[in-house]
Amino acid sequence: AAKKDGGVNHSMNDESTIAQRQVDPHSHALVLDPFEGCVAYVPDLGKDLIREFWYDKTNGKIGGEFNVLPSGMSTGKADGPRYFEFHPKFNVAYVVNELSSTVAVFSIDR
């Protein structure tokens, strides 16, 4: 639902609010892979996906995007990925999806 002075009321999770929140990209984090430190994962709530970028750790620069991943089960409804985290011991990553109130678990191929 729209706020009086513009913006979106994030406490409302109806279809209208979700549509407004997904008009533009909304990247919420940049998480480096813990294995080699050369892939940056960026959850994008607005575009409903996880972006993968090359990371040049020598120069500390983000390179080109080389892949995009769905943030959940691809049911046709918005997931809205917000957080991305690697498991400290297992080859697993978790994505917290804000709009669908779900957690997606991904197997990681090192």
Image (cartoon, helix red, strand yellow):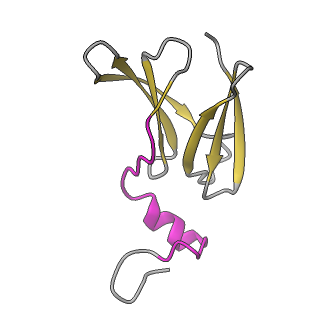
Is 74 or 96 nearer to us in this picture?
96
Is 53 or 20 nearer to us in this picture?
53
Question: Which of the 4 quarters of the picture holds residue 110?
Answer: top right
Question: Which of the 4 quarters of the picture holds residue 62?
Answer: top left
Which residue is drawn at the image coordinates 48% and 64% (left, top)? Answer: 19
Which residue is drawn at the image coordinates 45% and 63% (left, top)? Answer: 21
Span of residues in magenta: 9-30
Q: Please provide percent x and percent y for residue 81.
A: 56, 47
Which residue is drawn at the image coordinates 71% and 50% (left, top)? Answer: 102
Question: Is residue 35 placed above or below 105 in the rendered structure?
Answer: above
Is 53 colored magenta in this rendering?
no
Q: Please provide percent x and percent y for residue 82.
A: 54, 49
Using residue 46 as the reference point, say whether residue 75 is left or right of it. right
The number of discs equals 0
Q: Please provide percent x and percent y for residue 43.
A: 49, 41
Using residue 59 as the reference point, say whether residue 100 is left or right of it. right
Majority SS type along the magenta span: loop
Is 58 or 45 nearer to us in this picture?
58
Is 28 colored magenta in this rendering?
yes
Q: Please provide percent x and percent y for residue 34.
A: 55, 20
Question: Which of the 4 quarters of the picture holds residue 5?
Answer: bottom left
Which residue is drawn at the image coordinates 50% and 80% (left, top)? Answer: 1
Report the residue that reaches farthest toward the bottom.
Answer: 4
Question: Is residue 43 placed above or below 61 in the rendered structure?
Answer: below
